[in-house]
Amino acid sequence: MSLGKKVTLNTGVEIPQLGYGTWQSSPGEVSVGVFEALKAGYRHLDLAMIYGNQPEVAEGLKKAFAEIPGLKREDIFITSKLWNSQHDPKGVEAALDSCLAELELEYLDLYLVHFPVSFKTGDELFPLIAGSNEPDGDVEINDSISIVDTWRAMTKLPKSKARAVGVSNHTVEHLDALIKGTGVVPAADQVERHPLLQSKELVAYCKEKNIHITAYSAFGNNMIGVPLLVNRPEVKEIAEKVSKRIGSTATPAQVILAWSQVGGHSVIPKSVKTSRIIENFKEIELVPEEIEAIDALGKVPQRFNIPVIANKPRWNINIFGDEAEKNAPHKVII
Ligand SMILES: NC(=O)c1ccc[n+]([C@@H]2O[C@H](COP(=O)([O-])OP(=O)(O)OC[C@H]3O[C@@H](n4cnc5c(N)ncnc54)[C@H](OP(=O)(O)O)[C@@H]3O)[C@@H](O)[C@H]2O)c1
């Protein structure tokens, strides 16, 4: 069985381009999903403490090691993420330790700063500002910890526990601040990227600095009820044309995932349905005209994951410089 294409990170280690995402996978679904993904051939898992399901991911991993012949820990590239309330440099290694404990693993292949946003440090995952109530409250943003300080602590983590370190949801400005402030280039930036948000400036910057891009929400998943890209007529039409050319069915999901990997990026689709897990892992190659047809869908960039509008409780901070964030009182501290 082909286990998919790989690319090399700036640490010299290979990362499979097609990974398996685990956000919004409910209890009872994610251990099965992880097992089915590994059985289907995925060798890259995308996890995070904040997804609240890492102990269950651990169950899926244990089942996979027991039941998939020859499968070993070192065959799988595992990513997880430092949460916003864990940005205090003094607590970064302890946060990694507790992440590893949840996963019952000795090491991660990649540990990412989940967002360039620091919340009040502590055990509360979404600490509310005083006088603010759920579900419409605001999270307490900590403006005294800079992303450079957190990144410096990440770069000092023992390689025995985190083989590589990187970031997520960081813009060119944020990445530039990390590199100037510490001299250490992140191995990866995991960002929202799909045909409607192609982020050409970020892609060019990362190429120049040798920062690997992992695309999340490749199907345009969102919390605001907009139809997934796989269900849009224009994507279905491109998939039909690809199917005709290759003489077998190419689904909209496969077409989007193939597009997402052009340029050497990785992509981490999430599904808890076995048939879709298998569908998403099937590789197809696009020809230049098909890539251009998908590129053309993104003339008006659309970002879905904007915490100031999409999240409850709200994070009242300007992260991406999007129009919707312009009145937010907090900004990323570099
Ligand atoms: N770093 C970050 O801040 C961040 C943010 C968001 C996501 N992520 C990571 O990226 C992963 C992927 O992003 P995402 O979960 O937002 O969204 P996504 O992968 O773009 O889309 C997931 C949605 O697509 C559906 N789906 C999956 N395969 C399909 C197929 N072949 N046909 C039709 N529908 C399909 C899934 O439903 P079913 O499950 O019912 O199949 C689910 O509703 C996450 O799971 C997480 O690991 C990271």
Image (cartoon, rainbow, N blue to C red):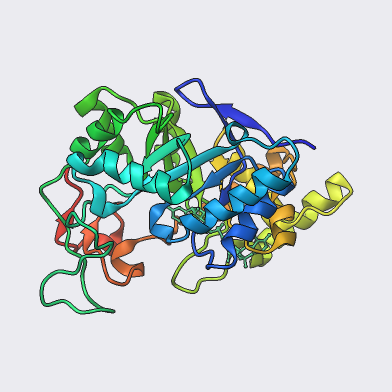
Q: Position of residue 149 (x, y in %)?
A: 18, 36
Residue lying at 68% horizontally and 66% vertically, measured from the top left: 233
Quadrant location of the N terminus in the rendered image: top right
The x and y percentages for residue 143 are: 12, 51
Asked whether residue 220 appears in the rendered view, the answer is yes
Residue 299 or residue 312, whichever sits in front: 312
131 or 289: nearer the eye? 131
Name the residue at 21% across, 51% down: 118
Using residue 238 as the reference point, say whether residue 321 is left or right of it: left
Q: Quadrant of ligand 1?
A: bottom right
What residue is drawn where x is 14% and y is 69%?
129
> In the picture shown, does residue 134 fall above or below 128?
below
Q: Residue 183: horizontal and vertical position, in percent?
A: 26, 22
Position above or below: 156 against 259: above
Q: How many marks?
A: 0
Residue depicted at x 73% and y 44%: 68
Residue closest to the eye, 314 or 219 = 314
Outermost residue to the right: 247
Q: Report x, y in % for residue 162.
A: 40, 33
Q: Is residue 58 left or right of residue 332?
A: right
